[in-house]
């Protein structure tokens, strides 16, 4: 969760999509050439038809772990999701369907039974068993292992094998997020015997991986290319992946990545960081740009809601009002994002879309209003006071955003100090309270682990949760989110979440800035990759292949 789960850090999170209408757009179309903002949003590219021996895929940095319990940032998720599968599967539209499990039932509000599919095998050909499933869930719950995902399973009391095809989970209280919680890395099944044999080396270059996915690890040296190859004995379908080998390479430098895409040295990349050279990428005629829904949200995190300038909610509201989101989208995202009304924007509406859409439309349009913002600053009595923003001059996105916030704050009467950390150290804002104490706030690109705004909100608005950086504590919000988690009826659950969202939109412990698209750069010779946040949690390259 350092340089993890954000543009340079974090864990759980939220949101996006440009428009609700994007959900019904043609899945085979996309922005091809020209301005990236010109095309419609899509969910997938047309399935490939021709076999391809080997491709190179760029990540914004090299992966550090392929152990599902510690795969928390974009590079680790993008790689691990090809090799490992979860009990339930997230579809490109955010809905959750059976994966390694065929279903989940609740014989009582505090008992869940997971039915396992027959015929599932690991990459070495051995069968997946109920013992493997119990072992995998318990690894997430073992604090000694340092996994990220224990908080989403914190209502589990026991996990046991009921029979060879059924796993039983006893809960401390009703948890209707459980199926979703088992649809990403927390629900991945690893081979018990293999993991126990590798011990602490599991998930490292020395220990490797053993999962059930369509790809398996081929080679990996620290600081070098990580390669996966098609699992010829993949249980999930008869046809093996068309792309035999994928070489993952970390390329943090914008100019290097742009050139590599243009020349074909790199065949594809999910552009997790906004690329200032995006307009140039397609000029060589080698690459197409596709845009789709995303879970992500670009936001400003208040470092401590109990001290400093930002203790006063009026100052937080003023900053939000003063920030020119549209100019920021144009300058940094080149049109591949939209101003955010809330942290939980359309890409996270995986259920009860009508409820979330209505609530979203009822929120104020986030247009800059300097006069209203300046009035709030004057009412708070902080005109001329200094605001300290955490950022990194080594990461273009962070530098651009911090300077945009600085401009906004100065327009409404505040002084601003920029506190810059190196790219490698930026995660300190998320991991170290002493580092956070030096600033009033810092920036994140965050995402939830499934398509539900409530998932993100619970990660920072519940005291003690994994992203409780700012000590925000509103008992009404906590009650609403806890009730939502224990509510079986999806409509009532969504109603509870939007009630919490309405309060958070006023309290602003996190200030939503913009909701980025998923942006896929893909060589014209290839097609078949998905174009949503599904690539964090499911085998996104299963249909990738040659155009034919």
Image (tube, helix red, strand yellow):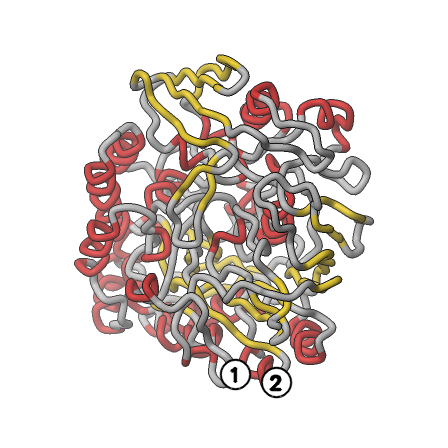
Left or right position of 252 against 104: right
* Quadrant position of the N terminus in the picture: top right
Q: Position of residue 291 (x, y in %)?
A: 46, 69
Question: Element at badge 2?
Answer: loop
Q: Which residue is mark 1?
A: 33
Kindly tell me whether residue 319 is visible in this rendering.
Answer: no
Q: Is residue 146 above or below residue 266?
A: above
Residue at (25%, 47%) from the top-left corner?
352
Q: Position of residue 111 (x, y in %)?
A: 36, 17
Q: Position of residue 269 (x, y in %)?
A: 61, 65
Residue at (65%, 27%) from the top-left corner?
127
Task: From the viewer's side, name the closer residue of 539 and 342.
Answer: 539
In this view, which residue lies farthest toward the front? 238
Left or right position of 266 against 317: right
Tags 1 and 2 touching, CB below 8 Å: yes
Question: Element at badge 1?
Answer: loop
């Amino acid at each position: 969760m350092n340089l993890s789960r954000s543009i340079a850090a974090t864990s759980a999170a939220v949101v996006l999509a440009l428009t609700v209408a994007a959900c019904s757009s043609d899945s085979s179309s996309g922005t091809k050439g020209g301005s990236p903002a010109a095309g419609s949003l899509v969910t997938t590219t047309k399935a490939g038809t021709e076999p391809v021996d080997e491709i190179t895929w760029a990540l914004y940095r090299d992966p550090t772990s392929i152990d599902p319990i510690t795969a928390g940032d974009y590079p680790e998720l993008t790689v691990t999701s090809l090799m490992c599968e979860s009990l339930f599967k997230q579809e490109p539209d955010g809905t959750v369907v059976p994966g390694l499990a065929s279903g989940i039932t609740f014989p009582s509000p505090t008992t869940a039974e997971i039915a396992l599919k027959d015929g599932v095998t690991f990459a070495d050909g051995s069968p997946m068993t109920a013992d493997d499933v119990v072992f995998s869930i318990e690894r997430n719950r073992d604090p000694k292992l340092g996994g990220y995902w224990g908080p989403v399973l914190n209502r589990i009391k026991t996990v046991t094998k009921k029979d060879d095809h059924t796993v039983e989970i006893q809960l401390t209280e009703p948890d209707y997020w459980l199926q979703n919680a088992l649809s990403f890395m927390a629900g991945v099944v690893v081979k018990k015997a293999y993991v126990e044999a590798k011990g602490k080396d599991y998930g490292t270059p020395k220990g490797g991986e053993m999962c059930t996915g369509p790809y398996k690890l081929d080679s990996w040296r620290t600081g070098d290319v990580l390669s996966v190859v098609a699992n010829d004995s993949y249980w999930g379908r008869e046809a093996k992946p068309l792309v035999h080998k994928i070489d993952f390479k970390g390329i943090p430098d914008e100019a290097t990545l742009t050139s590599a895409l243009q020349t074909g040295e790199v065949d594809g990349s999910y552009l997790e960081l906004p690329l200032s050279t995006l307009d140039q990428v397609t000029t060589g005629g080698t690459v197409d740009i596709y845009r789709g829904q995303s879970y992500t949200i670009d936001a400003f995190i208040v470092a401590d809601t109990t001290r400093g300038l930002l203790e006063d909610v009026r100052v937080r509201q003023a900053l939000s009002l003063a920030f020119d989101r549209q100019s920021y989208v144009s300058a940094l995202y080149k049109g591949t994002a939209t101003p955010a009304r809330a942290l939980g924007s359309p890409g996270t509406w995986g259920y009860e879309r009508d409820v979330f859409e209505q609530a979203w439309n009822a929120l104020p349009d986030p247009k800059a209003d300097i006069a209203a913002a300046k009035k709030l600053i004057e009412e708070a009595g902080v005109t001329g006071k200094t605001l300290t923003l955490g950022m990194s001059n080594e990461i273009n996105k962070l530098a651009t955003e911090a300077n945009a916030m600085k401009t906004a704050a100065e327009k409404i009467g505040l002084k601003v100090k920029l506190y810059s950390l190196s790219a490698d150290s930026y995660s300190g804002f998320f991991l170290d309270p002493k580092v956070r104490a030096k600033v009033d706030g810092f920036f994140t690109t965050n995402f939830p682990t499934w398509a539900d705004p409530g998932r993100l909100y619970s990660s920072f608005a519940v005291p003690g949760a994994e992203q409780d950086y700012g000590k925000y504590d509103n008992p009404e919000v906590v009650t609403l989110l806890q009730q939502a988690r224990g509510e079986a009826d999806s409509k009532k659950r969504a109603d509870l979440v939007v009630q919490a969202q309405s309060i958070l939109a006023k309290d602003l412990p996190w200030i939503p800035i913009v909701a980025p698209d998923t942006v896929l750069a893909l060589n014209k010779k290839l097609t078949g990759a998905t174009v949503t946040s599904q690539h964090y949690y499911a085998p996104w390259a299963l249909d990738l292949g040659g155009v034919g």
